[in-house]
Image: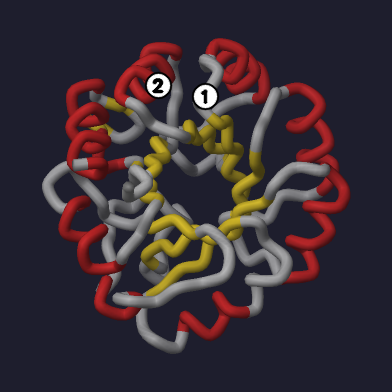
Amino acid sequence: MTKRVSVKICGLTSADHVDAAARAGAAYGGFVFFAKSPRHLSLAQARALASHAPLGLAKVALVVDAEDAFLDDLTAQVPLDMLQLHGHETPDRVRAVKARYGLPVMKAVGVADASDLDSLESYLKVADQLLVDAKPPRNADLPGGNGLAFDWRLIAGRRWPIPWMLAGGLSPQNVAEAIAMTGARQVDVSSGVESAPGVKDAARISAFVAAAQA
């Protein structure tokens, strides 16, 4: 029997969003800690949402080139299941974060062309998971959540020795095609299930998870 595709709903900002993700059958809920993002949370907001999340919804913190001082506060105040490093963290930094906090670490790698896949390889021995995302435009304010896809043919048939997740421009309308083309067993969505920047739509979340798992 084929294992169901696991879905991550990233950028949750309210208890209603958390409930919608869990009700739809998402495996992961993502909390964003990046001031320029419309999905940015304070530690107090994130603690309340993480405490509200039901069992079975893994709580993932997305950070961008975060210093230890912030990560110390984050992990002390917010009950988390995973850290997602979405900046320019080196393999050595990924290894250090994993060792310091004892949490699984997912490293995001932006892809625009085949050459970007080489940098991905360097994280295979230090990260617990990879997030294969669309590389943001050169002058973009956000490292992710821009609603952009990359050419999925670049990773068609690719297999890596650790779990990986497909992200970038996914929506209820295209996620099934993306899974069929790439073989992804995990997918991540943020802007693709929103009615406005940072505002998740319960119907779109439900439609996305259903399409991913169909």
Looking at the rendered image, the disc whose residue lies closer to the viewer, 1 or 2, is 1
Q: Looking at the image, which residue is at 86% across and 52% down? A: 99
Q: Please, what secondary structure does the residue beneath circle 1 have?
A: loop
Q: In which quarter of the image is residue 124?
A: bottom right
Q: On the image, which quarter does residue 9 sit in? A: top left
Whole-percent x, y for residue 51 in the image: 61, 13
Q: In which quarter of the image is the C terminus?
A: top left
* Quarter of the figure with residue 167: bottom left
Which residue is found at the position 38% from the left and 31% from the top? Answer: 26
Secondary structure of residue under mark 2: helix
Q: Where is residue 191 in the image (x, y as percent from the top left)?
A: 30, 41
- Colouring scheme, one of rainbow, by chain, secondary structure, one colour: secondary structure
Q: Name the residue under label 1.
A: 56
Upstream in the sequence, badge 1 or badge 2? 2
* Image disc number at residue 22: 2
Residue placed furthest toward the right: 100
Q: In this view, does 189 lie to the left or right of 171?
A: right
**Name of the residue lying farthest toward the left:** 173
Question: In the rendering, at what x and y percent does residue 47 appear?
Answer: 65, 18
